[in-house]
Image: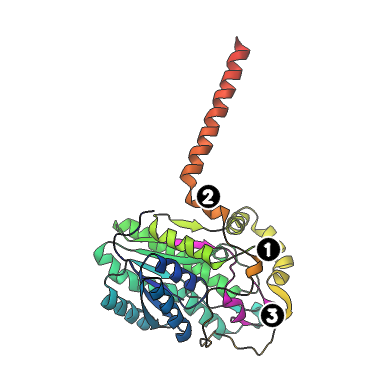
Amino acid sequence: MNAPSQPEVVVITGASAGIGRATVREFAKHGARIGLLARGHDGLEAARREVEEAGGRALVLAVDVANADAVEAAAEAVEREFGAIDIWINNAMASVFSPIKEMTAEEFRRVTEVTYLGVVHGTLAALQRMLPRDRGTIVQVGSALSYRAIPLQSAYCAAKHAERGFTDSLRSELIHDGSKVHVTMVQLPALNTPQFGWIKSRLPRKAQPVPPIFQPEVAAEAIYWAAHEKRREVFVGLPTLQAILGNKIAPGLLDHYLANTAYDGQQTDEPEDPNRPHNLMEPLPGDHGAHGTFGSQAADTSPAFWAVKHRAVLGAVAGGFLAIAVAAAGHGIARRLK
């Protein structure tokens, strides 16, 4: 992956915490100029300081991505400040932990507006600027749940499925038009982010990511890499691959498996406070950083993602072993024929 010759202009939604915050730090290490979009002022200001300490530049934009006009205005502000946007990363999300039978229409609407329509709004703002220049990259931050939905997160899973469908349509249209604008989707596993302490929940016990868990830096590395490579889609972590392949092979079996395991698997042993604050409609005050409370269980690396990055090398090695095996087999056959 070649380093950019001059500072890149990058927009990251959901930049104040979790995956977005880790991604901000990753791009800041490379001196990027970053438009920071999120709702929470405290987290945005802390992210700005981190960018500047790393040698980059940042513009704080308190934006709810559910508001298309606000996203468009933010894109305009970034280009006024830093110049043409090179990379746009759609990462903002909202969710509710709850059985469907207890969900409200308003909750489904809100999760959809942020997690799915936020991606649409960001993509439209990016295309408005990238298409006339015939360059730029849009990174959609997805999830294994965009292929295989699980119980208790129906609104989020549905929004992620919609995001993938939207991205597939866009990709085909860009190919049809001969556009050099590139769109990629990064499918992520369970991550140790603060979201499990601020998402609205009706679960009796505290929510947790379904193990195995990875640190948000694993996601940030993958997002940065995807932004600079021409891959259609990037799968991060063996659990992501297992979920996607398992759903293709035996979706009915997974229905029953998740019915039996995913309720307990998404909860710790600690009771939840039904009255704790959540961020569904409004951001919570404070700087929540990139990490959640599951660091002792989280992996710092993903061998499966390493394999994705180095598939050419692995292919060559596998080809070499195959050639040796074929040669050895041929030699054995020749000896028996003598």
Residue 202 lies within the magenta run: yes
Measure the alpha-carbon separation of dots 2 and 3.
37 Å
Which residue is labeled 2 in the image?
307
* Residue sticking out furthest to the top: 338
Label 3 secondary element: loop
Q: In this view, does 166 lie to the left or right of 253?
A: left
Figure label count: 3
Quadrant of the image containing the C terminus:
top right
Label 2 secondary element: helix
Residue 210 seen in this snapshot: no
Q: Residues within 10 Å of mark 3 (few under 14, many from 20)?
A: some
Q: Residue 174, image x and y in percent?
A: 34, 60
Q: Is residue 92 left or right of residue 144?
A: left
The span picked out in magenta is 184-210
Is 324 above or below relative to 99?
A: above
Marking on residue 203: 3
